[in-house]
Amino acid sequence: MRTDTTVADVTVTEVAFPDPPLRNCAGLHEPWAIRSVMQLRTVGGFAGLSESYGDENFLAAVRRVGREVPGLSVFDVNGLAAVVARTLGGSDIPDAHGLIGPSSVDKSLARVLAFFEVAFLDAAGRVSELPVHALLGGRVRASVPFSAYLFYKWAAHRDADEDRWGEALDPDGIVAQAHGMINEFGFSSIKLKGGVFPVEQEIAAIRALAEEFPGRPLRLDPNAAWSVDTSHRVARELTGVLEYLEDPTPGLAGMAAVAARTTLPLATNMCVVGFGDLARAIPLGSVGVVLADHHFWGGMRASLQLAKICDVFGLGMSMHSNTHLGISLAAMTQLAAAIPNLTYACDTHRPWNAADVVVAPPVIVDGAVTVSDTPGLGVDLDVNALAELHENYLRAGITRRDDGAYMRRYRPDFRQPVGTW
Amino acid sequence: MRTDTTVADVTVTEVAFPDPPLRNCAGLHEPWAIRSVMQLRTVGGFAGLSESYGDENFLAAVRRVGREVPGLSVFDVNGLAAVVARTLGGSDIPDAHGLIGPSSVDKSLARVLAFFEVAFLDAAGRVSELPVHALLGGRVRASVPFSAYLFYKWAAHRDADEDRWGEALDPDGIVAQAHGMINEFGFSSIKLKGGVFPVEQEIAAIRALAEEFPGRPLRLDPNAAWSVDTSHRVARELTGVLEYLEDPTPGLAGMAAVAARTTLPLATNMCVVGFGDLARAIPLGSVGVVLADHHFWGGMRASLQLAKICDVFGLGMSMHSNTHLGISLAAMTQLAAAIPNLTYACDTHRPWNAADVVVAPPVIVDGAVTVSDTPGLGVDLDVNALAELHENYLRAGITRRDDGAYMRRYRPDFRQPVGTW
């Protein structure tokens, strides 16, 4: 077997870039979003890129695995999974914000595995002179639609200038934000991050969007802030208005209780976040749509397996987003291109962040990203930009994302509502 | 995207090779087994091989698809699946023997898709200078264990000389056959094809094997010949003796009724034969082990998806075999190598057939086949042997496998027992 595909070394660089004061039920986005960039080199001189979370406990685990990875073939994802499991054993790597559901050992391993797997696939694509989607079975679409991702937001971080999007704290503000997003990026679908204001106000925002943008698919995601009863009430009011309601309430049982009394599909990236959840969620009927996210589902190949399971069991597929840069956008696009049953527009935070670490980041035009057919993920590192964003990271002093702690600097009594509203 | 991976043309050749008079509940193996060999060429001059069924209705569908395949990339399995579906539409391609469960449109499409997909993967591996297992995520084992596959058999076909294995029509004959198989191939596991004699006799054969080969995993497969009550009786008698009981009775409901009253795992390649069956079988608890067979599950990638579903829902995985040549053995080995949760020895008919169409067929030593790390499937066509086996096909005059019709030449009143014994 050829040996030029063997991993020589892996380096991981923390980066930070400006993020607007976006609200969610966990709190408030900090002035700097943190992420991490992986560069993999093979002994044959091929490179692979990947992007993931920036939390220091996550990166400590990644670096432990990174020391064990040299010697593997970049095609050997099964070998990689074994190295991750052997190196990390029963480690749990919790995050502070809880926006992607509870942490677990399996999910922690899947998050670390995914970070490497994308770099493996990028390098494998470059070795084979093939786009990553070809290694995933081939693209079934030429472009991937993304959704506008609206947030309640403040006009500015403390002591900072107002950002270009301005304030959005009521239905009018949300509608204005949607116009801005759609004018600039051409989105066809619209998602509102909820769980911030009393449900009546969020229902009013959705109704205002429906009136202003008739026929456009709408979604609402309160990140499990609501009780089952509140979820029932919102589902009743917004059936026929939303295409799906995302994570209204916590847990498989709570979601099942909501689902049992509505025809509105419930989507999730919080209660079905690993393969182990599927075997329980499916008989319970907890969800109708799963939001894939290769960053925590174990990578792009694992996300294809998730997609097949959704297809077999009659669940819809959409895609989740965390704040990210161009490497992740390229990976999300390559993956989405290869999933036949991904029939919803994908989420992306992309419009909120202008910085990047790649030379020519994927762009959203007419609400979609054209699928790259160039080798690998189709993006090349901008080493100067990486250095600059790493400087940001060192200067920002943020080592784990904690939207709640940041919010409490403004409102000391802030507490995240979890299934209580 | 590189264009040297584009399919230029596909040719399919029918072959026939001598097969002993093996008994099963469908009847008797004919003197010639029929199969088909696919040769794919890309515009870059890369070749891909595949092997599948020889029935003329299957090959008519394959040839219709073969005319539409040029122009696809050999990496584009999703594109291939779309071409198969578009070309064949709602075609059902029944087989005459019923040994792999009922026919359906989905299964027919999956069988045709699989034939091409293996040739695509072989060519893709040669293009990439990688073994097929690397394209499937990497091998998790260096060799793949196979099981001895014992059959009740006659000494000879009519007007023919006795074959080297001789007669086996009772427990002593089966034990002698097992000794011959194990001496020659070193198998650790043993499977008996049942559904041929009254259950007491088959139970006695299993008991004789258990006594003669203590500690060796044993399996019994009557191809759904038994009633639910008979299946209960056999399960009661052989719990602790068999590692699993394969397809005792027809249908998901019947299997579930058996499974509900035994701790002996039930395996299947007859009632769960497509992804659509899984969504019904899992809640019913019909089976504990699924026997993958890339030839009818839609190919090697689809079999990996099946494996993941089995893993998620706590089902065991083993591998089914039909009479086959070295290309299929190579494909089965590459696939089995890449399935982490394939924890049983695979079935193979290999010892029953000496002929082949490849230059250096995989060999079974110590009950296992070493996983090839050479590009593609790791086997090269022997064009003279292919021509010879095609001559056999033309001479034999068999255009579809029909064990029942052949049996009725000896015993005109033979009828296949289906859930009735």
Image: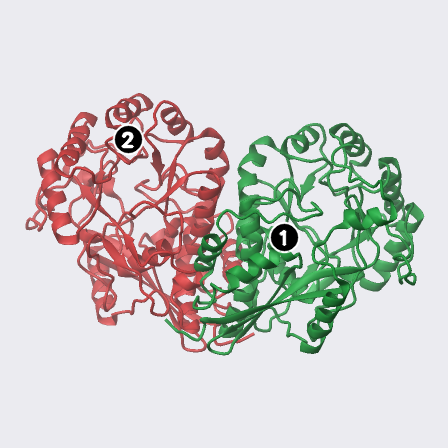
Chain colours: A red, B green
Tag 2: Cα neighbours inside 10 Å, few (<14), some, or many (≥20)? many
Q: Position of residue B69 (x, y in %)?
A: 47, 64
Tag 1: Cα neighbours inside 10 Å, few (<14), some, or many (≥20)? many
Q: For this rendering, which residue is in front, B241 or B176?
A: B176
Name the quadrant containing residue B281.
top right
Name the kind of residue labelled 2 in the image: Ala
Q: Residue at x 16, y 31 (%)?
A: A207
Q: Position of residue A375 (x, y in %)?
A: 36, 70
Q: Which mark is residue B293?
A: 1
Chain ID, mark 1 = B
Give the distance between the C-alpha atoms of the residues marked 1 and 2, in whole angstroms: 46 Å
Quick check: A421 above or below A66?
Answer: above
Whether residue B218 is visible: no
Which element type, helix, strand or loop, lies under badge 2? Answer: loop
Q: Position of residue A330 (x, y in %)?
A: 31, 60
Q: Which mark is residue A15?
A: none
What residue did someone put label 2 on?
A: A225
